[in-house]
């Protein structure tokens, strides 16, 4: 991570920052920053709020009131903790990931995000400048996704009892009442689409950890998918389900789908988009791209007759340019995923058995 | 914590458990339990779901759909991370605290909880039996509060990069549209009430950590306050605000109130309910009960003419039996809290400056 860190901008000079912000008088997190007293107030007022003051959160109540008009909509809720290591990586950082990850969980179930909460568990001694940088990045990620962080919390743990910064984001969203997306809905004959190249996020993190250099740096694909899903559902309201293949990658997502829908899944290796440099890194690291995490991609299952129209719409969206049809749902081998290899053989793609890439998100 | 741990029941025999549950084949958390693959599924299916299968969470979608009819209501959202050490203590554990803490944040703003999410950050090596015990305890706490955990997440960090179990809960709730509780609403002349004895939770934790023995064990007061707040708001819909004085204790809550409402706060030491054993422990530990955390108490500010009626209603509720009028909002010294001592002197009660009790919640 040396280059990334040496080259970092002070959060106040960062393009993500909207205005000059006050500065905490501390350089590192102290246990007292978790006290609920003056130091906690300092952290909130001088580190988080300058970046995250997008409305209700500034009211400093313990809870936030969320304006919402849920007529003909269902309320949807999702949560994720982020423990990625390192905190900063090509293409993103833990803050960006924490916003996009939760926005995407809402997006793939057909909901548009209403609001997010963010809870921080900080290790004593964490540089305050890292927190400022993360807060600025979260703000930029929120702006991209069109959502606000409306409430939050900060706890501090003693040195050696955490790892700098963990962030838990929870999102609520509204989904049109008519939609019924579910991984149980896939039916034989359906087409499976991916919204772009697979494995970018996991390889970006692992290359950094392992110190592997390529001619082109692999960047995390972390991105908010709610714009793409909105487009997709407009074009094809009959989409059976969407999922974002994060931890465990495409293979785990498809296995969950096959199990939940009691159907078989067949994918075609030749059609699965993987960047050359990601494939090269996977070879070097002994990884299979099918199992590597993504943070800005989705898998969709749709009736075959809608597939081409849906693919076209996905490709017209900036976050779906490399979309592809990667396989079908079949009657054979219910609950199982198989892949036709480049040379024509067929193999079972099983669920990830152990841990491939710890702390990838 | 030796007595507590030696005496612990297997979760399957615990009275909180509603039915015989399947068993994880692992005794300790492995990194692979955070993989998103087979081991993650094992943890969810065999450890969490047997206790938390109260509905939507069992559907295993990434998000939960929440049935809600928000006519004439506002949606409210709150989040808190829990990093309490030790995990188990007299009167509760981290799981119980994580449910009650978030329910109470909703309750004191006048909302009834709709649903909770729970995100776990586990340290590699944590005993699975501890997780089962915590999950059972969360289920019991949810039942008490009349709420459900509808979605969750689990991440695992390497040994030495966490501290067994951190839990982040987020709650959403509905508040009648007519209510406008806010810490900015206190006005000179208002009466300040506390719902019971102060300092119990903090002293329970600190006594355990410091190995202090008393004739009677001080137990944490962790409890869900949404029943009490419902009663209070029925009797006195004009309540200006309610707050739960957790980290930083009564002193921090009152300082926030004084600052936000630009009013003075006067409290009377003689009227503040503190258990004898809590006072004794505070003397021994060098703590001031005003700054010690509570997890089942609230402070309410109400118009003086409603105060007696409200006090009566609070005392009739099992969680408000020891309620008392503890002070007034005044015109003098706006933004400042003062206390009349037992011997008649007056002192300023300032905001907690550093860290008094790290990792109390």
Image: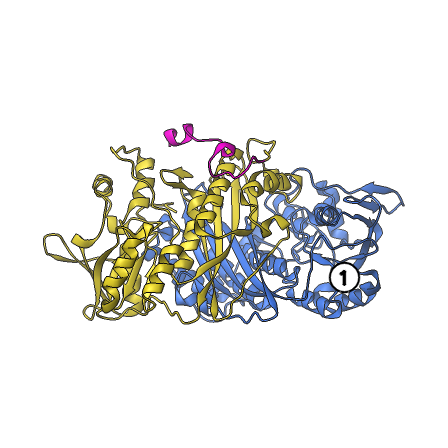
Chain colours: A yellow, B blue
What residue did someone put label 1 on?
A: B322
Determine whether, in the image, residue B204 is placed left or right of residue A108. right
Disc 1: host chain: B
Q: Position of residue A207 (x, y in %)?
A: 30, 37
Per the rendered image, the range of residues in magenta is A1-21
Please say if B166 is above or below B9.
above
A18 in magenta: yes
Q: Nearer the viewer, residue B40 or B90?
A: B40
B220 in magenta: no
Q: Is residue B139 visible?
A: yes
Q: Position of residue B18 (x, y in %)?
A: 49, 71
Determine whether, in the image, residue A47 is placed left or right of residue A301. right
- For the point 54% across and 63% down, which residue is it? A68
Specify the principal SS of the magenta part. loop
Determine whether, in the image, residue B197 is placed left or right of residue B160. right
Q: Is residue A351 visible?
A: no
Disc 1 crowd rating (10 Å Cα; few below 14, some 14-19, many 20+) is some
Q: Nearer the viewer, residue A195 or B9?
A: A195
- For the point 43% across and 54% down, which residue is it? A103
Q: Position of residue B36 (x, y in %)?
A: 35, 54
Secondary structure beneath dot 1 equals loop
- For the point 39% across and 55% down, which residue is it? A227
Q: Nearer the viewer, residue B41 or A40?
A: A40
**Residue at the outermost top position:** A6
- For the point 49% across and 55% down, which residue is it? A170
Disc tally is 1
Q: Position of residue B281 (x, y in %)?
A: 72, 47
Determine whether, in the image, residue B341 is placed left or right of residue A25. right
């Amino acid at each position: 991570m040396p280059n990334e860190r040496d080259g970092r901008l002070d959060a106040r000079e960062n393009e993500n920052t909207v205005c000059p912000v006050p500065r905490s008088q501390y350089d590192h997190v102290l246990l007292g920053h978790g006290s609920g007293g003056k130091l906690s107030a300092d952290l909130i007022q001088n580190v988080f709020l300058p970046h995250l003051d997008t409305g209700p959160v500034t009211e400093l109540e313990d809870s936030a009131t969320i304006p919402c008009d849920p007529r003909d909509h269902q309320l949807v809720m999702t949560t994720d903790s982020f423990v990625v290591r390192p905190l900063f990586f090509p293409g993103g950082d833990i803050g960006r990931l924490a916003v996009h990850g939760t926005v995407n969980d809402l997006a793939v179930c057909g909901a548009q995000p209403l609001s997010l909460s963010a809870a921080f568990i900080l290790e004593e001694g964490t540089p305050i400048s890292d927190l400022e940088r993360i807060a600025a990045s979260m703000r930029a990620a929120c702006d991209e996704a069109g959502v606000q962080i409306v409430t939050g919390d900060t706890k501090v743990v003693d040195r050696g009892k955490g790892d700098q910064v963990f962030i838990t984001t929870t999102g609520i969203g509204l989904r049109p009442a008519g939609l019924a997306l579910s991984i149980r809905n896939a039916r034989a004959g359906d087409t499976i689409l991916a919204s772009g190249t697979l494995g970018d996020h996991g390889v970006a993190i692992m290359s950094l950890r392992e110190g592997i250099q390529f001619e082109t740096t692999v960047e995390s694909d972390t991105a908010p998918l709610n714009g793409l899903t909105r487009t997709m559902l407009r074009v094809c309201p009959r989409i059976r389900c969407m999922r974002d293949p994060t931890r465990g990658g495409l293979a785990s997502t498809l296995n969950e789908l096959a199990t939940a829908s009691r159907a078989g899944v067949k994918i075609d290796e030749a059609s699965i988009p993987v960047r050359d440099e990601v494939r090269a890194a996977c070879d070097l690291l002994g990884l299979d791209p099918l199992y590597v995490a993504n943070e800005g991609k989705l898998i969709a299952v749709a009736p075959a007759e809608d597939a081409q129209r849906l693919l076209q719409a996905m490709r017209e969206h900036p976050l779906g340019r490399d979309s592809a049809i990667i396989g079908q749902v079949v009657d054979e081998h219910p609950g199982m995923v198989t892949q036709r290899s480049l040379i024509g053989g067929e193999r079972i793609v099983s669920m990830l058995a152990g841990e491939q890439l710890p702390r990838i998100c």
